[in-house]
Image (tube, helix red, strand yellow):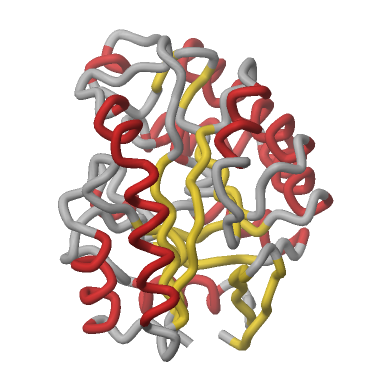
Amino acid sequence: MLIDLHTHTCYGHGSNTVFEMFQAGRRAGLDVHGFSEHSPRPSGYDYTNEYREHLNKHFQDYLDEVEKIKQERKENKILLALELDWLEDEPDFMQECMERHSFDYVIAGIHFIKKWGFDDQASHWVNLSKQEKHAYYAAYYKTMIKMAESKLFHIVAHPDLIKIFSRETFAEWIKNNKSLAEDALLACKENKLCMEISSAGLRKPCQEIYPCRTLMEIAKDIDIPITFASDGHCVNTIAKNIGMLHEYAKEYGFTEQNYFENNTQITVAL
Protein backbone atom coordinates (compact mmCIF):
# COMPACT_ATOMS: atom_id res chain seq x y z
CA MET A 1 0.00 0.00 0.00
CA LEU A 2 1.12 3.52 -0.77
CA ILE A 3 0.40 5.61 2.33
CA ASP A 4 1.25 9.26 2.98
CA LEU A 5 0.06 10.47 6.37
CA HIS A 6 1.65 13.93 6.46
CA THR A 7 0.47 16.52 3.94
CA HIS A 8 -0.41 20.22 4.05
CA THR A 9 -2.53 22.75 2.20
CA CYS A 10 -2.72 26.44 1.32
CA TYR A 11 -4.53 27.03 4.61
CA GLY A 12 -1.20 26.70 6.40
CA HIS A 13 1.94 27.60 4.49
CA GLY A 14 1.41 25.17 1.64
CA SER A 15 0.72 26.12 -1.95
CA ASN A 16 -2.39 24.21 -3.01
CA THR A 17 -6.01 23.74 -2.02
CA VAL A 18 -7.39 20.67 -0.29
CA PHE A 19 -8.97 19.44 -3.52
CA GLU A 20 -5.79 20.03 -5.53
CA MET A 21 -3.80 18.06 -2.98
CA PHE A 22 -6.40 15.29 -3.07
CA GLN A 23 -6.16 15.12 -6.86
CA ALA A 24 -2.35 15.03 -6.67
CA GLY A 25 -2.57 12.16 -4.20
CA ARG A 26 -4.77 10.22 -6.59
CA ARG A 27 -2.36 10.84 -9.46
CA ALA A 28 0.50 9.61 -7.27
CA GLY A 29 -1.40 6.39 -6.62
CA LEU A 30 -2.00 6.87 -2.91
CA ASP A 31 -4.08 4.18 -1.24
CA VAL A 32 -4.28 6.24 1.95
CA HIS A 33 -3.97 10.04 1.97
CA GLY A 34 -3.74 11.76 5.32
CA PHE A 35 -4.32 15.51 5.48
CA SER A 36 -2.46 16.90 8.49
CA GLU A 37 -2.54 20.68 8.45
CA HIS A 38 -0.57 22.57 11.08
CA SER A 39 -2.33 23.54 14.27
CA PRO A 40 -2.90 27.13 15.28
CA ARG A 41 -0.22 28.55 17.60
CA PRO A 42 -0.43 31.17 20.34
CA SER A 43 1.44 34.44 19.90
CA GLY A 44 5.05 34.32 21.02
CA TYR A 45 5.77 31.16 19.03
CA ASP A 46 6.71 32.97 15.88
CA TYR A 47 8.35 32.44 12.51
CA THR A 48 10.03 35.04 10.32
CA ASN A 49 7.42 34.43 7.61
CA GLU A 50 4.46 34.03 9.91
CA TYR A 51 1.26 32.42 8.63
CA ARG A 52 -0.60 32.30 11.96
CA GLU A 53 -3.43 34.71 11.11
CA HIS A 54 -4.05 33.08 7.74
CA LEU A 55 -4.27 29.66 9.38
CA ASN A 56 -6.53 30.91 12.17
CA LYS A 57 -8.86 32.51 9.63
CA HIS A 58 -9.13 29.39 7.50
CA PHE A 59 -8.71 26.50 9.92
CA GLN A 60 -12.41 25.66 9.89
CA ASP A 61 -12.34 25.78 6.09
CA TYR A 62 -9.60 23.14 6.17
CA LEU A 63 -11.68 20.89 8.42
CA ASP A 64 -14.84 21.35 6.34
CA GLU A 65 -13.16 20.76 2.99
CA VAL A 66 -11.37 17.57 4.02
CA GLU A 67 -14.57 16.22 5.57
CA LYS A 68 -16.44 17.02 2.35
CA ILE A 69 -13.95 15.00 0.30
CA LYS A 70 -14.10 12.16 2.83
CA GLN A 71 -17.87 11.99 2.44
CA GLU A 72 -18.02 12.43 -1.32
CA ARG A 73 -15.07 10.21 -2.29
CA LYS A 74 -15.64 7.11 -0.21
CA GLU A 75 -13.80 5.01 -2.77
CA ASN A 76 -10.62 6.77 -1.61
CA LYS A 77 -9.15 6.39 1.88
CA ILE A 78 -8.96 10.01 3.02
CA LEU A 79 -8.02 10.80 6.61
CA LEU A 80 -8.38 14.06 8.51
CA ALA A 81 -5.55 14.76 10.92
CA LEU A 82 -3.63 17.54 12.59
CA GLU A 83 0.07 18.26 12.95
CA LEU A 84 -0.09 19.69 16.44
CA ASP A 85 2.89 21.75 17.52
CA TRP A 86 4.26 20.35 20.76
CA LEU A 87 4.49 23.42 23.00
CA GLU A 88 5.74 22.21 26.33
CA ASP A 89 4.42 25.19 28.29
CA GLU A 90 1.00 25.38 26.57
CA PRO A 91 -0.97 22.27 27.60
CA ASP A 92 -4.33 24.06 27.64
CA PHE A 93 -3.80 25.55 24.20
CA MET A 94 -2.85 22.16 22.74
CA GLN A 95 -5.88 20.51 24.31
CA GLU A 96 -8.11 23.23 22.87
CA CYS A 97 -6.69 22.63 19.39
CA MET A 98 -7.40 18.92 19.63
CA GLU A 99 -10.97 19.54 20.71
CA ARG A 100 -11.73 21.53 17.57
CA HIS A 101 -12.57 18.31 15.74
CA SER A 102 -12.58 14.53 16.02
CA PHE A 103 -9.36 13.82 14.12
CA ASP A 104 -8.41 10.42 12.75
CA TYR A 105 -4.96 10.95 14.28
CA VAL A 106 -2.69 13.68 15.62
CA ILE A 107 0.95 14.11 14.61
CA ALA A 108 3.42 15.60 17.06
CA GLY A 109 5.47 18.29 15.37
CA ILE A 110 8.36 19.41 17.55
CA HIS A 111 9.41 22.71 15.99
CA PHE A 112 10.03 24.78 19.12
CA ILE A 113 12.47 24.64 22.00
CA LYS A 114 10.72 26.84 24.51
CA LYS A 115 9.65 29.69 22.19
CA TRP A 116 12.42 29.35 19.61
CA GLY A 117 11.34 27.97 16.25
CA PHE A 118 14.63 26.19 15.61
CA ASP A 119 13.74 25.20 12.03
CA ASP A 120 12.95 28.77 10.97
CA GLN A 121 16.22 30.20 9.64
CA ALA A 122 19.67 28.76 8.92
CA SER A 123 21.14 32.08 10.06
CA HIS A 124 20.02 31.32 13.63
CA TRP A 125 22.49 28.43 13.72
CA VAL A 126 25.51 30.05 12.09
CA ASN A 127 27.03 31.62 15.19
CA LEU A 128 26.19 28.84 17.63
CA SER A 129 29.14 26.99 19.11
CA LYS A 130 29.31 23.22 18.92
CA GLN A 131 28.48 23.07 22.62
CA GLU A 132 25.39 25.24 22.13
CA LYS A 133 24.20 23.03 19.27
CA HIS A 134 24.73 19.95 21.40
CA ALA A 135 22.64 21.50 24.16
CA TYR A 136 19.78 22.14 21.74
CA TYR A 137 19.94 18.59 20.42
CA ALA A 138 19.65 17.28 23.97
CA ALA A 139 16.77 19.65 24.74
CA TYR A 140 14.97 18.40 21.64
CA TYR A 141 15.03 14.77 22.76
CA LYS A 142 14.18 15.66 26.33
CA THR A 143 11.08 17.52 25.18
CA MET A 144 10.23 14.55 22.92
CA ILE A 145 10.00 12.41 26.06
CA LYS A 146 7.59 14.90 27.62
CA MET A 147 5.59 15.00 24.40
CA ALA A 148 5.23 11.23 24.38
CA GLU A 149 4.21 11.15 28.02
CA SER A 150 1.42 13.67 27.34
CA LYS A 151 -0.49 10.91 25.49
CA LEU A 152 -1.95 13.46 23.07
CA PHE A 153 -0.41 12.05 19.91
CA HIS A 154 -0.33 9.07 17.55
CA ILE A 155 2.82 9.81 15.51
CA VAL A 156 6.09 11.64 16.15
CA ALA A 157 6.96 13.57 12.99
CA HIS A 158 10.44 13.98 11.46
CA PRO A 159 12.16 12.65 14.62
CA ASP A 160 15.49 14.39 13.99
CA LEU A 161 14.23 17.67 12.56
CA ILE A 162 16.70 19.40 14.87
CA LYS A 163 19.47 18.46 12.40
CA ILE A 164 17.95 20.58 9.62
CA PHE A 165 20.69 23.24 9.58
CA SER A 166 23.58 21.33 11.18
CA ARG A 167 23.58 17.80 9.82
CA GLU A 168 27.29 17.02 10.29
CA THR A 169 27.40 18.33 13.86
CA PHE A 170 24.24 16.42 14.68
CA ALA A 171 25.62 13.20 13.18
CA GLU A 172 28.65 13.46 15.45
CA TRP A 173 26.47 14.21 18.50
CA ILE A 174 23.90 11.45 17.98
CA LYS A 175 26.56 8.74 17.80
CA ASN A 176 27.75 9.75 21.25
CA ASN A 177 24.26 10.29 22.70
CA LYS A 178 22.34 7.30 21.45
CA SER A 179 21.00 6.59 24.94
CA LEU A 180 19.10 9.89 25.08
CA ALA A 181 17.62 9.37 21.61
CA GLU A 182 16.74 5.80 22.57
CA ASP A 183 15.00 7.03 25.73
CA ALA A 184 12.95 9.41 23.59
CA LEU A 185 11.90 6.79 21.05
CA LEU A 186 11.19 4.29 23.83
CA ALA A 187 8.92 6.86 25.47
CA CYS A 188 7.12 7.18 22.14
CA LYS A 189 6.71 3.42 21.79
CA GLU A 190 5.59 2.94 25.39
CA ASN A 191 2.93 5.61 24.88
CA LYS A 192 1.73 3.98 21.65
CA LEU A 193 3.20 6.44 19.17
CA CYS A 194 4.54 5.47 15.78
CA MET A 195 7.74 6.96 14.38
CA GLU A 196 7.45 8.77 11.06
CA ILE A 197 9.92 8.14 8.25
CA SER A 198 9.85 11.23 6.05
CA SER A 199 11.27 12.24 2.70
CA ALA A 200 10.99 15.94 3.60
CA GLY A 201 14.60 16.09 4.78
CA LEU A 202 15.76 15.32 1.25
CA ARG A 203 14.28 18.68 0.20
CA LYS A 204 15.71 20.58 3.17
CA PRO A 205 19.23 21.90 3.85
CA CYS A 206 20.20 18.67 5.66
CA GLN A 207 19.49 16.72 2.43
CA GLU A 208 18.85 13.53 4.35
CA ILE A 209 15.82 11.41 5.17
CA TYR A 210 14.23 11.91 8.59
CA PRO A 211 15.36 10.00 10.63
CA CYS A 212 19.07 9.41 10.04
CA ARG A 213 20.64 5.97 10.03
CA THR A 214 21.69 6.07 13.68
CA LEU A 215 18.08 6.69 14.70
CA MET A 216 16.88 3.99 12.33
CA GLU A 217 19.16 1.52 14.09
CA ILE A 218 17.67 2.52 17.43
CA ALA A 219 14.14 2.36 16.03
CA LYS A 220 14.63 -1.20 14.82
CA ASP A 221 16.35 -2.29 18.04
CA ILE A 222 13.35 -1.17 20.08
CA ASP A 223 10.89 -2.25 17.36
CA ILE A 224 8.87 0.97 17.30
CA PRO A 225 6.07 0.91 14.69
CA ILE A 226 6.54 3.22 11.71
CA THR A 227 4.57 5.40 9.33
CA PHE A 228 5.56 7.05 6.05
CA ALA A 229 5.28 10.67 5.00
CA SER A 230 6.23 13.17 2.35
CA ASP A 231 5.33 16.22 4.47
CA GLY A 232 4.15 17.55 1.11
CA HIS A 233 3.27 21.24 0.94
CA CYS A 234 2.43 21.32 -2.78
CA VAL A 235 1.07 19.02 -5.46
CA ASN A 236 4.60 18.16 -6.64
CA THR A 237 5.63 16.72 -3.28
CA ILE A 238 2.66 14.48 -2.41
CA ALA A 239 4.03 10.93 -1.93
CA LYS A 240 7.46 12.23 -2.94
CA ASN A 241 10.09 9.49 -2.62
CA ILE A 242 7.81 7.21 -0.58
CA GLY A 243 9.16 4.23 -2.51
CA MET A 244 12.67 5.21 -1.45
CA LEU A 245 11.46 5.35 2.15
CA HIS A 246 10.07 1.83 1.87
CA GLU A 247 13.45 0.53 0.74
CA TYR A 248 15.18 2.50 3.49
CA ALA A 249 12.93 0.90 6.12
CA LYS A 250 13.40 -2.58 4.66
CA GLU A 251 17.18 -2.18 5.00
CA TYR A 252 16.63 -2.20 8.77
CA GLY A 253 14.25 -5.14 8.73
CA PHE A 254 10.92 -3.33 8.96
CA THR A 255 8.16 -5.36 7.33
CA GLU A 256 5.04 -3.39 8.35
CA GLN A 257 3.67 0.13 8.14
CA ASN A 258 0.80 1.80 9.97
CA TYR A 259 -1.94 4.35 9.63
CA PHE A 260 -4.74 5.56 11.90
CA GLU A 261 -8.46 5.81 11.27
CA ASN A 262 -10.85 7.05 13.96
CA ASN A 263 -7.98 6.91 16.49
CA THR A 264 -7.42 3.25 15.71
CA GLN A 265 -4.03 1.98 14.57
CA ILE A 266 -4.11 -0.19 11.47
CA THR A 267 -1.03 -2.24 10.53
CA VAL A 268 -0.42 -3.48 6.99
CA ALA A 269 2.43 -5.23 5.22
CA LEU A 270 5.23 -3.11 3.79
Q: In the depicted view, which residue is nearer to us: 231 or 254? A: 231
Q: Please give the name of the residue rendered at 42% of the width and 91% of the height, measured from the top-left corner.
A: 75
Q: Please give the name of the residue rendered at 43% of the width and 74% of the height, measured from the top-left corner.
A: 70
Q: In the depicted view, which residue is nearer to us: 234 or 179? A: 234
Measured as percent of width and height from the top left, residue 172 is found at 49, 34
Query: Does residue 167 sit above or below 88 in this rendering?
Result: below
Instruction: Name the outermost residue toward the right.
Output: 190
Q: Please give the name of the residue rendered at 22% of the width and 17% of the height, measured from the top-left corner.
A: 123
223 horizontally vs 160: left or right: right
Query: Does residue 120 sit above or below 240 in this rendering?
Result: above
262 horizontally vs 46: left or right: right
Quarter holding the C terminus is: bottom right
Residue 58, by quadrant, is top left
Measured as percent of width and height from the top left, residue 61 is found at 32, 49
Q: In the depicted view, which residue is nearer to us: 38 or 54? A: 54
Measured as percent of width and height from the top left, residue 241 is found at 31, 71
Q: Please give the name of the residue rendered at 63% of the width and 33% of the height, measured from the top-left corner.
A: 176
Residue 102 seen in the current view: yes
Residue 240 seen in the current view: no
